[in-house]
Amino acid sequence: MYKFTYGMPTTLIVGSNCLVENSDVFRKYGHHALIVTGTHSSKLNGSLEDSILALENENIRYTIFDKVEEDPTLETVERAYVENRDKDIDFILAVGGGSAIDAAKAIAILFRNGISAKEILSLRNLTGIPLVAVPTTAGTGSETTPYAILTLHEEKTKRNIGQSIFPDVAFLDARYTLNMPFSITASTAVDAFTHLAEGYLNTRANLLSDTLAEKGLKLFGECVPALKSRECDIDIREKLLLTSSIAGMVIAQTGTSLPHGMGYALTYEKGVPHGTANGILYPGYLRIFKKTEKLTRLLSLIRMDSIDALSAFFKDILDFEVQLSDEEIRRYVEGLLSNEKKLRNHPERVSRDELISIYKNMLKK
């Protein structure tokens, strides 16, 4: 007997130039948009220019907040709100990678509720003003998830803000990913893969999430040769962008699992990009599984014949250098042991020694 709930409130509009060609979508959201983006990439890849053109086509005013950093903080979210709260903002247009979209989700909540950024972490069931996303990387899938991951300096980590905020609409145009450096292309692609894998190998997986996960894994597998050769044309980048959005749909239902909980410390303390931090933990993570039927299926979908082959692939395409002391491993494991949600999502009981082994079997260059 099947028993599950599936919801995906985000409308996806996909294709080259889809943002400008479908600018009428913005009409129902109001007369003044706050564009939330980073400092450089959206200006270089054409996504900001197209966003402005789309809004101007509909005679919608806009204000630009372009100070979102990689791994955005509560302080940045607060700044965006404080600087613009008196401007009659009707909706948010997030243009950029996961950092911009995640920050925009939190900013939308502040505009709706008029609270401080810290209150987002303690209050429950908050909603935001309308949010439209234009992803320019193919990795986080934030355009199809309810999550917003922020850096919390007081806790010395990154974590989800604990609210459920889906974009109303997301425009997927792979042209905006064409000028990404390969190191970012690879890290974000691995991030998308880890979302698919952790959603697939998850206690909360269901018929529909698995159907999506298997399609996303197959698309990722089709991109493996291009990633190996470092030749990612527009067709490959479109597949990676769809893989990322599909992966977001999967974890919107299941959440992520152990590698994400373990990788945040590597990002916060060691400066390892998020997707890379997840990926280098995979050799140890996959080897702790006792029931391997689904794992075998996963490897076949991505055209890998073993965990070793996947590890070699990650080692080849990812740029990283991480060394951990025994004390750091102990501290990171204790942190994960307090994260009941990540532990609960793993389908088998996991021991402290197994978590230690994941860190100790981390990929090394």
Image: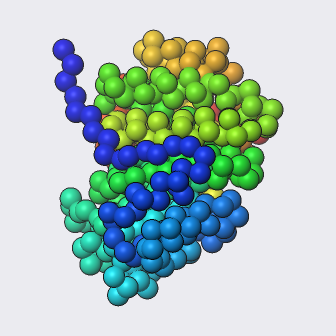
Depth order, front residue of 24/197:
24
Residue drawn at 56 percent across, 43 percent down: 15
Position in image of residue 340 (x %, y %): 31, 43
Does the image show residue 359?
A: no
Residue drawn at 39 percent across, 76 percent down: 32
Quadrant in which the N terminus is drawn: top left
Residue drawn at 66 percent across, 61 percent down: 46
Position in image of residue 152 (x %, y %): 44, 66
Depth order, front residue of 111/70:
111
- Compared to 3, does 364 lie above or below? below
- Compared to 54, does 310 lie above or below? above
Locate residue 290: give its quadrant: top left
Quadrant in which the C terminus is drawn: top right
Q: Is residue 239 left or right of residue 209?
A: right
- Compared to 33, does 175 lie above or below? above
Residue drawn at 27 percent across, 77 percent down: 115
In this figure, what is the number of numbered marks? Answer: 0
Position in image of residue 158 (x %, y %): 46, 58
Does the image show residue 285?
A: yes
Depth order, front residue of 311/223:
223
Q: Is residue 330 left or right of residue 253?
A: right
Give the image's coloring scheme.
rainbow
Position in image of residue 137 (x %, y %): 60, 50
- Compared to 26, does 315 lie above or below? above
